[in-house]
Amino acid sequence: MIRAGKYRALAMLGDGIRIEQLAEGRCVMDCHRYTLNPGAASQGQYAHEGEEFIHVLSGQFEITLDGREHYRLGREDSMYFKSTSFHSWINPGPDVAVLIWINTPPTF
């Protein structure tokens, strides 16, 4: 259990990206809250073993899978995909985006 406001912040992936670890210990999933400033994005596309689930709490989020499938998510939208699909992402909106992002197996 982690109390509100006591989440460990992970190393930044880039400007305008904050990642908080929502579960600690010997977990089979990485559970994170991403806070993305407008324009914050992955540094290109990447792929790895596993599966991912994203739920948008606020703002907008855009993800591209395998360079051809584009998805734009808004508040309360969710998606699931296999991590072996090359993926890249961005906050395309004018506001901060907040996401719950779960990976299995853990990648951080």
Image (spheres, helix red, strand yellow):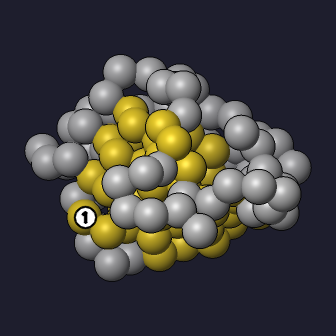
Query: What kind of element bears circle 1?
Result: strand
Instruction: Decide which of 85, 10 is in the foreground and name it.
Output: 10
Left or right: residue 106 versus residue 78 is: right
* Residue drawn where x is 31% and y is 29% of the image: 16
Compared with residue 7, is residue 43 higher up or lower down, i.e. above or below?
above
Compared across the picture, whether 46 is left or right of 97 comes to right
Residue 60 lies in quadrant? bottom left
Q: Position of residue 70 (x, y in %)?
A: 48, 56
Residue 94 percent across, percent down from the top left: 12, 44
Across and down, in percent, residue 2 comes to: 53, 62
Q: Is 68 in front, or is 21? A: 21
Q: Name the residue nearer the viewer: 27 or 58.
A: 27
Residue that label 1 marks: 58
Locate the N terminus by quadrant: bottom right
Quarter of the rendering containing residue 33:
bottom left
Which residue is painted at 47% across and 50% down in the image?
Answer: 7
Residue lying farthest left? 94
Relative depth, front residue between 39 and 23: 23
> Is residue 68 visible to the viewer in this orientation of the structure?
no
- Residue at image x 37%, y 62%? 4
